[in-house]
Amino acid sequence: MVNPDPGRLPRAAEYVRSLPDGLRSFPGCSVRGTVLEPYVRDFKSLATEPSLPEAVADLFAGKSTAPWVAETTFQVAYLAVRDLAFRDDAAFHRWVFAVNAELLDGPLIRHLVRLVSPTLVVLGAAKRWSHFHQGSDLVPGKVEAVGGRTLARSELRYPIGLFTECFLAGLEQAFLAAVTKARGKEPKVVVLRTEPGRTTYEASFRS
């Protein structure tokens, strides 16, 4: 297997090096193919990057037609986009937010999200996660009112080594997009803590 060039793809290269069995690692973990569509649309040119593994290059080229794709392949693609297409995390996170907001603008999802409260959107995030990811779980936690804001926590559980800090930080923007689409006032999402195999997020909005 071709390995990412650490000079051009430092994050992707580090991730591949960390995997116990390359892209075949974590065989029970996968991502729904529809998640890949923005990557093909916006970064098709990355398919010609010479040091990308073939499966990742095929992903960018739009050759992956399977309903589910290995999570490790998607993670390398995610990190390659960060390495090659964005100058800093802030710019990358704006794109992640926009892509997730776009996903939530699909006819059925848009209707559902806008009919319920921001709290229910946060609590329903676990079901949405399982719709798009296999082998990892988003577990809703405590919801409370503090100082005029509603705080809702969720814990993402996953095999140790599956997700990188870069990806886990980017998920803040995915969750923020959902709360924003549900018309949460002054929405915020932060990583409260990360431990091996689990990361806790806190979403909040003005009550």
Image (cartoon, rainbow, N blue to C red):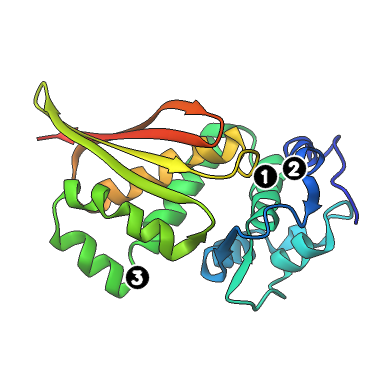
Observer-nearest of 113 and 90:
113
Is tag 1's residue or tag 2's residue first in the polypeptide sequence? Answer: 2
Question: Hey, what amino acid is under mark 1?
Answer: Leu
- Residue under the image location 51 percent in, 27 percent down: 195
The span from disc 1 to disc 2 (Cα, nearest Å) is 5 Å
- According to the picture, the residue beneath numbered tag 3 turns out to be 106
Question: Which residue is under mark 1?
Answer: 79
Sequence-wise first label, 2 or 3: 2
Visible in this render: residue 104? yes
Which of marks 1 and 3 precedes in the sequence?
1
The structure residue drawn at horizontal position 75% and vertical position 60%, both measured from the top left corner, is: 56
Residue 185: x and y in percent read 17, 39
* Mark 3: amino acid: Gly
Do callouts 1 and 2 mark residues in contact (Cβ within 8 Å)? yes
What residue did someone put label 2 on?
A: 12
Q: Secondary structure at mark 3?
A: loop
Across and down, in percent, residue 184 comes to 19, 43
Q: Secondary structure at mark 2?
A: helix
